[in-house]
Amino acid sequence: MSGASPVLRVAVAAPVPEPFDYLPPSAPGAPLPGPGQRVLVPFGRGRRVGLIVALAEVASVPPERLKPVIEVLDERPLLAEADLAFLCWAADYYQHALGEALFSALPARLRRSAPCSGSAAAPGERGWRLTEAGTAVVLDDIKRAPRQAQVLTHLRALGGEAPAADLARDLGECAAVLRALARRGWVAPCRIEAGTPPPMLGAGPTLNADQQAAVDQVGGAFGSFAPFLLEGVTASGKTEVYIRLLEAAIAAGRQALVLVPEIGLTPQLERRFAARLGGTMAVLHSGLAEGERERVWRRAAAGEVDLLLGTRSAVFVPLPRLGLILVDEEHDLSLKQQEGFRYSGRDLAVRRAQQAACPVVLGSATPSLESLANAHAGRYRWLRLHRRASGAAAPSVTLIDIRAQPLEAGLSPPLMQLAAEQLAAGNQVLLFLNRRGFAPVLTCHDCGWVGECPRCDARLTLHRASGELRCHHCGLIRPAPGRCPSCGRPDLRPLGQGTERVEEILARRFPGLPLARVDRDSTRRKGELTRLLSAARRGEYRLLLGTQMLTKGHHFPGVTLVGVLDADAGLYGADYRAPERMAQLLVQVTGRAGRAERPGRVVVQTRHPEHPLLVSLLREGYPAFAEAALAERRAAGLPPFSHQALLRAEAGAADEALAFLRAAAAAGAPDAGEVVLWGPAPAPMERRAGRWRAQLLVQAPRRAALRRFLADWLPRVRQVEGAGRVRWSIDVDPQEMA
Ligand code: ADP
Ligand code: ZN
Ligand code: ZN
């Protein structure tokens, strides 16, 4: 067979499970492309971009059916061998079509055949820097210009310069203030190259014993695979530990990867890293334009970036000198991709560290039960920060039993009273309600009609400001009726409350008090969320009311009272993970209070003050709660003490999805062994957006058994009668049963 050219195994960007074989380009003398290079190939009646994953001697189809690739798109491999191996491992672990997985992990532009922009030099961003005179200004001397003082303070905190866009994001619109400062000669415009270290690097506080121990342990593991769980309450100084470790890694000439759940919500982290770390930092998240994403990706892959900060997909970016991985808020659901190629950024980070032989640190105030179980079993080394680093006392938490209390839009008299006291004392108050809109139900008082979504098994939420009924599951919007659509009488009543309704009551109760409502509706306009949050941080709003958006990682130093309006939603949820999520949320909300010198207080309204979860959480804290929850999971044989995958299906007709899953179950049953199939059963929300949904749960006591079963079974599922008519997907390690 000498002289016969090898076959190219190409993963095509299409939902087909296996790679396809092609011949090298037919042009005489063309160099033979290799793994990691992209090619344009004939596919069906069209052409597709594909990635060469291997060279083979023998084709899997008869030679006469092999076609040559049309064009080689990359001169050199886009992915190194190790990166390709990691991606293939991930696709296999999550049982996802290789080509789709590979291309969804790459920047979108690389999925197309258009010539790539290469690594065009960054033009530099417009920014502002402190002048020498500005550095010397005594802030007390400009007390009468508080906005100017604020901008100067911020620039100093950031190391002396910052992109204009960042300043606007952190401080609100401040162009006029900057021009005024420029006229006084205290600041000057400049261009900031992406990733340029700020000129003045801050030193940071002396670490306490817990922090030092954490830094020493992880630092001692540089150069080898070692997973760590870093558990520390909010404000215990985890970020400070990250900074020291990043410093050490960069100083050792290694690249570091930091994964966070959502970047838009934590701009402080980015600025803090930039202000403290030398080296080149780049940020990667879904808000970037496609070209920018590709540029960051290429710079990281070329080793030009020392620190890559990104959301879950950053775990796939090639980093040839990778030496440290940090995952912040490792319990957060946003680290899991919930559609298409479903993967856990956190779990892949651990695998990636193993492959790169480097330490990985999973940090959280409320670690996931999975990570805690790993720490218990000795698979992860467990680092704990016991106290708040700044010395601030932990807030006190009390329950308010709201049974038989007269509630006004869900607010009890004791909570109102406490809020009034704190506001009168000049402090800030934060109220948390995880439900937007005015009211979750609109009903007719005469005939009992209830507004329901015609396409989902769900009630329509009343949004009074816009005069609409909206479905929060499929996006349906209708004008709110003035009279009952069923009996025609006018007595329609909203039941329950969302943030819009609470806002109305608060505005009436505290007239003239600046109030910020932070939820998805109030922050639709671009930049509005950042504006609200930074104004809140500066104390411009006295009363903060919001959903989950308010709880993630923000520092509101002036908040002395946090009120949780309704703690009960998570207590009796259908999903066995509901209590864990609820506990994490409560602790995160609690962390918003009393970060500064003023002590914080948290009150939680509930109708179940005796519920064991709430009691153990509030009396003994998250670690005790987690122990109890883990014991329950172990007794019930649920993850992390077993392993699951969920086969979901949806179809246009009522029984189609269930019938498909029944056939799929039958195709697996003969060799299930220690694997158990539960169901199929209708999904918790059986109808959504007009489609019928069902699911089949696969569970195994051991990971290896689950993987073996899936690898065997899924090819047969594809052959099941009706597989083409339903939309189906497999979710390995599912986090939500919905
Ligand atoms: P976390 O990331 O756990 O929420 P941070 O690292 O943000 O905690 O620390 C909370 C606050 O305490 C920050 O203002 C930080 O500057 C400060 N801090 C952290 N470590 C120390 C320390 N060792 N001594 C004094 N202050 C510290
Ligand atoms: Zn009616
Ligand atoms: Zn709907």
Image (tube, rainbow, N blue to C red):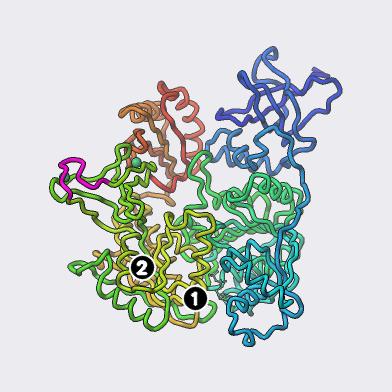
Q: Quick one: label 1 or label 2, which is nearer the N terminus?
A: 1
> To which residue does mark 1 refer?
557
> To which residue does mark 2 refer?
617
> Up-down: is 643 above or below 29?
below
Q: Nearer the viewer, residue 245 or 425?
A: 425
Q: Residue 267, located in which quarter of the rendered image?
A: bottom right
Amino acid type at mark 2: Leu
Decide if residue 396 is in sight here.
yes
Q: From the image, which quarter does the N terminus lie in? A: top right
Magenta span of residues: 481-490
Q: Position of residue 474 (x, y in %)?
A: 38, 41
Q: For ligand 1, tell me if the residue under mark 1 lies within 8 Å.
A: no
Answer few, some or many: residues within 10 Å of disc 1's Cα (few below 14, many 20 plus, some between 14 and 19): many
* Secondary structure of residue under mark 2: helix
Residue shown at the point (58%, 34%) measured from the top left: 100
> Up-down: is 417 above or below 80?
below
